[in-house]
Amino acid sequence: MSVELKTGTLADFFSSAKATAKEIDEQRKVTKKDIIWVDPVDLMAILKPERTRLVQYLRKKKRVIFSELMADMKRTPVSLNNDLKILSRYKLINIFKVPNPGHGVHKVIEPTFGNDKIEFKTEI
């Protein structure tokens, strides 16, 4: 299984959804699609070297605390938060907070792609 990030317009998305609806209407087995539609500008942003390195790091982890991630990646909180924000927008990661008894909360990052490959497809 793989996660496919695909650039396109809203019309492209609806065309894909229409094809799936047609499969359902014809009572055919629906082919599972792990497609995430991405704005072309964001796709270029995801492919930046630091974000690519971040995805590769997260592939090795099931769950990581923000402070550990920041130290391991040798990044500032602002730059790391910017990268996490774009990955979260496209559901490549989940970010949530868990209690840290006596010390507030931890921000936790979990990748959603596991060991699945991530394919980037674009048409210009």
Image (cartoon, rainbow, N blue to C red):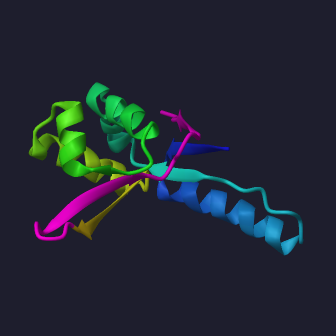
In reply to whether residue 121 is colored magenta, the answer given is yes
Percent position of residue 13, x then y: 56, 57
Q: Is residue 47 visible?
A: no
Q: Is residue 99 left or right of residue 15?
A: left
Query: Who's the residue at 10% across and 46% down the image?
Result: 78
Residue 115 in view here: yes
Q: Is residue 16 above or below residue 26?
A: above
Q: Is 4 left, or right, of 95 in this rendering?
A: right
Residue drawn at the location 41% of the way across and 32% of the way down: 56
Which quarter of the rendering shows the N terminus?
A: top right
Q: Viewer-proximal residue, 75 or 65?
A: 65
Counting from the top left corner in percent of width and height, residue 55 is at 39, 37
Q: Residue at x 14, y 41 (%)?
A: 79
Q: Is residue 121 above or below residue 82?
A: above
Residue at left offset 80%, top offset 62%? 30
The span picked out in magenta is 100-124
Residue 109: x, y in percent? 33, 54
Q: Nearer the viewer, residue 110 or 124?
A: 110
- Farthest front residue? 102
